[in-house]
Image (cartoon, rainbow, N blue to C red):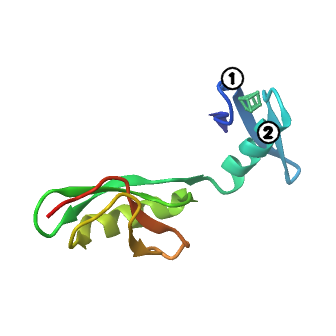
Amino acid sequence: MDTTCIMCPMGCALRVEETDGKVVVTGNGCPRGAKYGEAEFLHPERVVTTLLKHERGGVVSVKTDRPIPKSKIGEFLSWAASYRVSGAVATGDALAEDPVGCGATVVATADYEE
Ligand code: SF4
């Protein structure tokens, strides 16, 4: 697998391979890149940002408060498409707790005034 380390602005091009049951990272300029590459290979995660519809119209921008497994992103976006926010929202409000069972809370990233 080829990927780019995002741990600093250098953006080292990483190659991650599994050899004899061991994950080997090359191309990293420092140990942080090796750790990042191994995590990307074994259990990639992302913070997800999206928009939730408000029951009064318009949308509320949100993000997960922590990275979620990439394998859960589709399920998360399906949940987001059907979820409706109600009431006024302030930036940082927790709008849903753990909607797809991976421990992430959905928080508002902008205000919504009714
Ligand atoms: S491997 Fe190290 S030097 Fe390279 S981008 Fe990652 S953190 Fe920066």
Residue type indicated by callout 1: Met
Residue at the image position 32 percent from the left and 61 percent from the top: 90
Residue designated by label 2:
32
Side of 105 relative to 58 (left or right): right
Q: Residue 13's x, y, as percent?
A: 69, 26
The secondary structure type at the circle numbered 2 is helix
Instruction: Decide: is 15 above or below 35.
Output: above
Residue designated by label 1:
10
Q: Residue 94's x, y, as percent?
A: 41, 69
Q: Is mark 2 within 8 Å of ligand 1?
A: yes
Q: Quick one: quadrant of the N terminus?
A: top right
Q: Residue 65's x, y, as percent?
A: 51, 61
User: Dividing the picture into quarters, in which one does residue 24 lie?
Assistant: top right
Q: Residues at badges 1 and 2 in contact (C-beta under 8 Å)?
A: no
Residue type indicated by callout 2: Arg
Q: Residue 99's x, y, as percent?
A: 42, 75
The residue nearer to you, when weighing 2 against 110, is 110
Residue at the image position 21 percent from the left and 73 percent from the top: 86
Looking at the image, is mark 1 or mark 2 earlier in the sequence?
1
Q: Residues within 10 Å of mark 2 (few under 14, many from 20)?
A: some
The residue nearer to you, when weighing 90 against 83, is 90
Q: Is mark 1 within 8 Å of ligand 1?
A: yes
Q: CA distance from mark 1 to mark 2?
A: 12 Å
The residue nearer to you, when weighing 72 against 95, is 95
Q: Quadrant of ligand 1?
A: top right
Instruction: Decide: is 23 above or below 83.
Output: above
User: Dividing the picture into quarters, in which one does residue 43 lie?
Assistant: bottom right
Residue at the image position 28 percent from the left and 56 percent from the top: 111
